């Protein structure tokens, strides 16, 4: 029998350990119980973990541009520099607490002063025309760490990250934004997704994930760029399917298996890759509210919870020992 092979992947945002340390701790525990085990680790997540994943590709890989919570001018400046220098970049953003609808990015990219009131209905189409000219030839790709649109009942402008209703909604402004995006025909035709009406696929700001980065996703689509879930972007760039090939077990690290956090996690990508290769997938977490049925829906064959909350690394090492004991063939 060949030595067992375990693939560890995911993100760790709990206190006391970062993702690289967490992956190493689980690997240490697995080898403590089964020294013959080959363990491979892949950082797979949003924010700084997304940046670390792209950095692992070396000089030949694209440069990450992370969309911070708040004004997005820095993203526009980064895109302008990338277009000028011919640099390949990938944007990444989630559901921020203070979205600016991507207008900061668009303003920095074009030099236009974009109003945050009803006048945006007329200013937005003009700014998008100029922005398309400035990024012509640039392969625009954004990793969406949220599935929420920019506009709509459940959009990033309508609900906070904790899913409570925003109290500062400006309905006149959002109506003007909708009119502005609708008037600006996207540079690349958007295909309607199953279950979406025609208005949804014609208007980038209503597309799934267009709220990523507080609206940067909508602007990327309006400029003719591509938008995909963060996990799927990393699956492709890191060639995750090739890394899974030959493994006996896939382990995904995700601290809290709870809603709404899982909606912005990469767990479903890892479990989908495992399923595609007919491999068991087990999650390591600090807490979980998932029932057995929900675990199955997420593609999980098991969940191991860390028991030492005072020492993340110790709990993760112990989880590795339990993984090897329970899930690896003797």
Image (spheres, grey):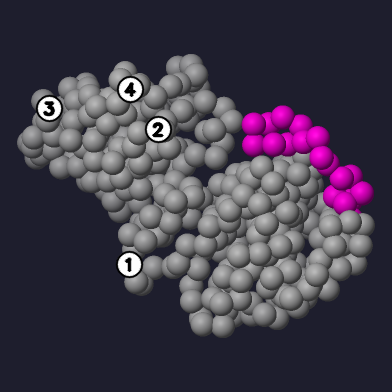
Where does the image place residue 147, in percent across and percent down from the top left? Answer: 62, 44
Give the mark nearest the N terminus, 4 or 1.
1
Q: Nearer the viewer, mark 1 or mark 2?
A: 2
- Locate the N terminus by quadrant: top left
Give the mark nearest the N terminus, 2 or 3.
2
Mark linked to residue 310:
4
Q: CA distance from mark 4 to mark 1?
A: 35 Å
Residue at point 89%, 56% (across, down): 117
Q: Nearer the viewer, residue 166 or 269?
A: 166
Give the mark nearest the N terminus, 1 or 2.
2
In the depicted structure, whether residue 33 falls above or below residue 89 = above
Give the mark nearest the N terminus, 4 or 3.
3
Q: Which residue is disc 1 drawn over?
A: 58
Q: Which residue is disc 2 drawn over?
A: 15
Q: CA distance from mark 1 to mark 3?
A: 33 Å
Q: CA distance from mark 4 to mark 3?
A: 23 Å
In the depicted structure, whether residue 327 falls above or below residue 248 = above
Circles 2 and 4 in contact, beta carbons < 8 Å: no
Q: Which residues are magenta?
A: 159-176
- Disc 3 is placed on an element classified as helix
């Amino acid at each position: 029998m060949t030595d067992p092979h375990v693939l560890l992947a995911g993100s760790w945002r709990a206190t006391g350990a970062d993702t690289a340390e967490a992956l190493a701790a689980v690997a240490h525990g697995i080898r403590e119980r089964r020294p013959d085990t080959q363990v491979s680790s892949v950082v797979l997540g949003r924010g700084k973990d997304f940046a670390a994943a792209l950095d692992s590709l070396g000089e030949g890989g694209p440069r990450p541009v992370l969309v911070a919570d708040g004004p997005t001018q820095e993203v526009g400046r980064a895109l302008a520099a990338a277009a000028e220098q011919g640099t390949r970049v990938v944007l990444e953003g989630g559901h921020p607490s203070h979205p600016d609808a991507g207008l900061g990015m668009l303003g920095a990219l074009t030099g236009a002063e974009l109003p945050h009131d009803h006048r945006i209905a007329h200013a937005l189409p003009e700014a998008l025309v100029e922005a398309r000219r400035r990024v012509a030839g640039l392969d625009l790709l954004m990793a969406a760490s949220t599935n929420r649109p920019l506009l709509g009942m459940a959009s990033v402008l309508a609900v906070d990250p904790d899913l409570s209703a925003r109290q500062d909604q400006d309905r006149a402004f959002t109506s003007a934004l909708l009119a502005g995006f609708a008037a600006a025909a996207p540079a690349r035709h958007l295909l309607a997704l199953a279950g979406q009406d025609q208005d949804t696929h014609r208007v980038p700001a209503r597309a799934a994930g267009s709220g990523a980065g507080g609206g940067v996703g909508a602007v990327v689509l309006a400029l003719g760029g591509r938008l995909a879930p963060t996990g799927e972007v990393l699956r492709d760039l890191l060639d995750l399917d090739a890394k899974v090939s030959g493994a006996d077990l896939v382990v995904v690290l995700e601290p809290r298996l709870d809603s709404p956090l899982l909606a912005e996690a990469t767990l479903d990508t890892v479990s989908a890759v495992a399923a595609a290769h007919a491999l068991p997938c087990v999650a390591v977490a600090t807490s979980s509210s998932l029932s057995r049925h929900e675990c199955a829906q997420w593609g999980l064959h098991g969940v191991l919870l860390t028991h030492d909350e005072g020492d993340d690394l110790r709990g993760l090492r112990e989880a590795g020992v339990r993984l090897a004991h329970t899930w690896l063939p003797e």
